[in-house]
Amino acid sequence: MEGDLWSWMQAVQEEIAHALGLKVLFSSDTLFEVHDDVNHVVDLNKLECTCLGWKSTGLPCRHAIAVFNSTRRTVYDYCSKYFTVDSYRSTYSESINPVPCGKPAEEEEEEGTESDNVHVLPPCPSRSPNQPKTKEAKREGPAKRVVFCSRCKESGHNKASCKAAL
């Protein structure tokens, strides 16, 4: 949580710094126009901005923060509930039980000993990404054109790789 807490606090601080020079125009108590490189509309009732940054992250974007600065509101009151301490506590309030692997104990007792268990091996390493699937796949491509050397007039190489003596 500390890493997550630090990263989202840092993200909010960066947005606060970017919001400092933005011009805010009041349309109503909850609707604002913010002038950045492009004009954006911030709706505090819906907790959204036309840049879609607020909606996608759950953290207010720089345009919303500019509105909060102009209206003397607190940025942290408009962050998603996901970022609250209560949410963190409720997430980890229940214990997390390990997932049993293999058969349940009741089935093992009925079937016999532990030697009946099947051991699953890891998969074989796959081919490298540059390796063609088969040799046939390599041949199926378009026919290559024949290259002729402009110096010796022979096929199969060009002037740069020509080894003929002059």
Image: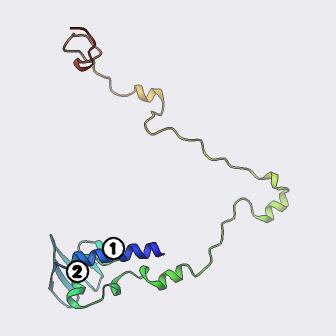
Query: What amino acid is found at the position of numbered circle 2 in the picture?
Result: Val
Q: Residue at x 32, y 23 (%)?
A: 143
The local crowd at label 1, few if under 14, some if 14 to 19, many if 20 or more residues have their Cα within 10 Å, is: some
Observer-nearest residue: 51 or 85? 85
The mark lying in front, picked from 1 and 2, is 1
Q: CA distance from mark 1 to mark 2?
A: 19 Å
Residue 160 location in percent, x, y? Answer: 24, 20
Location of residue 29 with respect to 48 vertically, above or below: below
Residue 58's disc is none
Quadrant housing residue 69: bottom left
Q: Which image quarter is the C terminus in? A: top left
151 lies left or right of 139: left
Q: Residue at x 18, y 89 (%)?
A: 28
For label 2, the residue is 42
| Percent position of residue 131, x then y | 45, 34
Q: Residue at position x 48%, y 82% from top?
A: 87
Q: Quadrant of residue 36?
A: bottom left
Residue 11: give its label: 1
